[in-house]
Amino acid sequence: MALRISLSTPPSLHSTPSQRSSSSSSSLVPNRCIDWSGTKRRVPSAISMDRKRESVGVVRSSLEATQEAAGAVAVEGQVTEVTKDTFWPIVKAAGDKVVVLDMYTQWCGPCKIIAPRYQELSEKNLDVVFLKLDCNQDNKPLAKELGIRVVPTFKILKEGKIVKEVTGAKIDDLVYAIETVKSS
């Protein structure tokens, strides 16, 4: 990807007023663009081309998000990353299985420390669905809906309802809570 800089001649440098008005009113006058490699080329409007690319990218990413939500599946023996769009479909698909959700953030030290232990739990408990949710700006509505106050927070669901919660990086408390919900 090249950095492009648009260069155009200011109207005050034209020699006559008629040239000034004709060049400033015409939007089809090509700009001279220089990309980072130093090659010169003429394009009608570098900015409008960038805007077209951005709008196509937005459409593509929204289509991908819809497809991702439609085909959201948790894998047995693994921790599955969820979003606000994929969480509830996966919980519904789990049926009467116990679902454990790790609510974390990228910057949280205790979240990073407990993550490998959480992965080990998922490998040992094949009858439980293990999910994780990054509580960033994109997933903030779901985090609020689930009532998160601190990270890490583990929500344990059964039949689509929250039945237990463990706050903090307390692996022993989490194991006990999972066993309690599984036996009930």
Image (cartoon, rainbow, N blue to C red):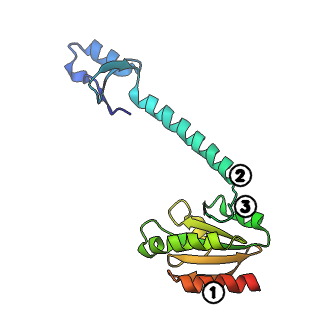
Residue 111: percent from the left, percent from the top? 47, 73
Determine whether, in the image, residue 103 is placed left or right of residue 44: right
Image quadrant occupied by the N terminus: top left
Is residue 40 depicted above or below 111 in this figure?
above
Instruction: Answer whether labels 3 and 1 touch (C-beta < 8 Å).
Output: no
* Distance of label 3 from label 1 (alpha carbons): 26 Å
Does the residue at mark 2 contact the one at mark 1 (Cβ under 8 Å)? no
Q: Is tag 3's residue or tag 1's residue first in the polypeptide sequence?
A: 3
Q: Residues within 10 Å of mark 3 (few under 14, many from 20)?
A: some
- Residue drawn at the location 29% of the way across and 20% of the way down: 40
Disc with the residue nearer the chain's start (2 vs 3): 2
Residue assigned mark 3: 89
Mark 2 and mark 1: Cα distance apart in space: 32 Å
Q: Nearer the viewer, residue 172 or 73?
A: 172
- Closer to the observer: label 3 or label 1? 1
Q: Image point 68% across, 84% down: which residue?
A: 179
Q: Secondary structure at mark 1?
A: helix
> Mark 2 and mark 3: span between their CA atoms?
9 Å
Q: Earlier in the sequence, mark 2 or mark 1?
A: 2
Find residue 42 and report its horizontal and vertical position in percent: 35, 18
Residue that carries the numbered disc 2 in the rendered image: 71
Mark toward the viewer: 2 or 1 = 1
Residue type of the residue flagged with mark 3: Pro
Q: Which residue is mark 1?
A: 176
Q: Looking at the image, which residue is at 25% across and 15% down?
A: 17
